Image (spheres, rainbow, N blue to C red):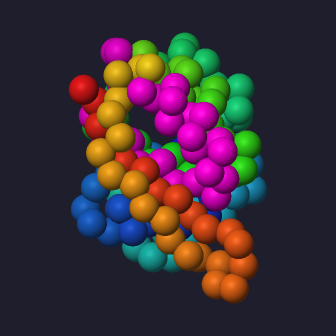
Amino acid sequence: DFFCGLGNFTLPIARSGAAVLGIEGSDALVKRAAQNAAFNGLSANTEFSARNLFEMDEAALAKLGKFDKWLIDPPRDGAMALVKSITPEIAPELIVYVSCNPATLARDAAELVQRGYRLKAAGVMNMFPQTSHVESIALFAKL
């Protein structure tokens, strides 16, 4: 779970029984995410790490290891450095990309397509009623 914040997605995924690594740029948020996992009895299924995801490169990403699935939920700037760091050796089979900025989602989606992914499904969630802001969710599968 890249850009995991307090574990908003990490914890529900862990509750399903999956082992989840949550990565966030802020040490303070990583600490709070781990506390949140402990409070919810999910420490055994979760691990959290602080990394600068805006400066991610292939070597740093490779050190994390290979995962079957990724969830990416970046801030408005998107996740271009992370997406550009995907190599065939560590490419996950599925990527769920949650975005609050349609422009950066489109930009990052184009890069994912260049890296051998196909958009399988997409949708919009109205998380902010009575505003013009929405969350977009896209599912990408490795070809």
Q: How many marks are shown on the rendered structure?
A: 0
Residue positioned 57% across, 64% down in the render: 135
The reply to whether residue 49 is in sight is no
In-front residue for pair 108/94: 108
Q: Quadrant of the C terminus?
A: top left
Q: Quadrant of residue 2?
A: top right
In-front residue for pair 109/4: 109
Query: In this rendering, would 61 be left or right of 56?
Result: left
Residue positioned 43% across, 51% down in the render: 138
Relative to 46, does residue 106 appear above or below in the rendering?
Answer: above
The percent position of residue 44, horizontal first and vertical second, equals: 36, 59
For this orientation, the residue located farthest to the bottom is 130
Residue positioned 40% across, 73% down in the render: 41
The range drawn in magenta is 88-113
Relative to 60, does residue 68 appear above or below in the rendering?
Answer: below
Residue positioned 54% across, 20% down in the render: 85
